Amino acid sequence: MDHLMELREASLPGPHGSFFPSGGGGLSLTLDAGTSHVILGNTESVLRAIGAVLTGREALAGGELRLDGKAAAFLSPADALKRGFAFSPGVFDPISVMGHARLLYPGAKPLRRDTGALLEAFLPGVRPDTPAGKLPPEGKLALQLFLSAVRGDRLLALEDPMRDISPAALDAAARSVDRLARTGCCVVILTRRPRHARAGTRLTAVTDGGAVFDGLSDEADIRFLEEILGLGGRTRENLREAIPGGVVLEVRGLSARRKRDRAPLRGVSFEIREGEITGLCAMKGEGGERLLRILAGLEKPAGGRVRLNGNILRRYDYPLIHRSVRYIPPPSPAPFELMPDVTVMDSLAMQCSRFSSLFVHGVLRRDRLKAYTRFILKEYPVGAEENTPLSCLDEAAVRMLLEAPELDRSGSVLLLSHPGEGLTPDRLRFVRRCLEEEKTDRTGILYLTDQVDEAMAICDRVLVMYGGSVVLECDSLNASRKQIALAMSGRGDAEGPVLL
């Protein structure tokens, strides 16, 4: 049986005329009709090159491309699209669902397939005149798959299609992908996230242009994929060099009056950059925790300006902040002995925000909650079942259960307050791996701690707060431990500053 597409010892085109791999070997890959195939890569450039070759946007630098068992080559992207090999460009929010389908046929020609049945299969209950902007992320993915089915593609390449989809909707998104595959199309998912490896039936892991694993997606777990891709062993220095740092959160002159037992803030100014962990070293009671609560929208400041993703927050609107900012509060003993019947699923239901995809028209969907609970217990080391009472879990497991929803939610800013306090070494290593993954996703992270060694080991930049003000800002690689400790105790003048 001939394969739909086959790459034999292929050298992929790279930037500035280079190619992958740079010496010897190549990528061998087989794609069959009616399957969903995940290609997991360690770099964006390799995945971009594979997608370009599969859809005719780039030619192979070496090796052989075969279609239906015969040697072939694409003359242009239009030639590849004519043969049924397409790359999905995404959707446009103002255009309706059926408007996207009409764009496939210029000149307002009638559609050549029964779009009504396909629309009901991929987007059940969605009206044809619904704007794409009103669809959730999993709905936008289903819209792209629907358009591919209307067009009759033989192969559809998708670049990181699961990135913005919530964990509760991943199963629905995987079913949509499988639905398109059953029509005879080969769905190729290009991603850097090991957690999305099971969105397809087959999996190929690629590093530097060569395949290091090829088989069924169920045969490889997440830790194995992280090891072979080198994601678990990345150092802080390499991650910082690989990811540019644009400003995602800018704070200027933020102030807050003293309130009961909460310390005041006096003219706090700093920046959080994407793909970088900014450490905030402060003793308890010096204003660090209150600063995080203000940035998370839980308190209002008395003055100052906060710019989030380039937009000045004139009013602290919680739904607006919730879409971009995630906040993990400090560990605190919870009175679970007063609620002995609360289970793991009940706890996740209480943590769910009404803005999440678990709610439909303000009502919590039980089926989505069950799928979400199974996902959390599978991906995070909680060590419990859906109906396990919280009173049966140790403190570290409860901490992980409370932090998992925020770690898994999408957002450009992540605020953590003392995340390493009270955790076992295994769970602490897992949290640090999550932070490394957040850095690769270009998330700006603010890490509050009162441990100098912890801040210097994990963070890229260090801010020191004392008396409600930032008194020192330095690079963690060149900082002096003594200087940071003195600044935290209010004796920062003992040495000269190491300001950036």
Image (cartoon, rainbow, N blue to C red):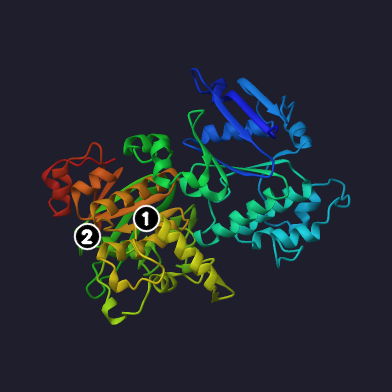
The residue located at (72%, 45%) in the rendering is: 184
Label whose residue precedes the other's in the sequence (1 or 2): 1
Residue 422 is marked as 2
Marks 1 and 2: which is nearer the front? 2
Q: Say whether residue 102 is left or right of residue 15.
A: right
Disc 1 target residue: 252
Query: Residue 206, percent across and down?
Result: 50, 33
Residue pushed farthest front?
1
Percent from the top left, x then y, of residue 118? 76, 57
Looking at the rendering, in which quadrant would you find the C terminus? Answer: top left
Left or right of 383 in this view: 247? right
Position in image of residue 326 (x %, y %): 41, 60
Depth order, front residue of 401/97? 401
Whether the residues at callouts 1 and 2 have beta carbons within 8 Å, the answer is: no
Residue drawn at x 50%, y 17% as measured from the top left: 24
Q: Looking at the image, which is closer to me, 486 or 385?
A: 385
Query: Which class describes the residues within 10 Å of circle 2: few (<14), some (14-19), or many (20+)?
Result: few
Report helix, strand or loop for mark 2.
loop
Alpha carbon distance from label 1 to label 2 = 33 Å
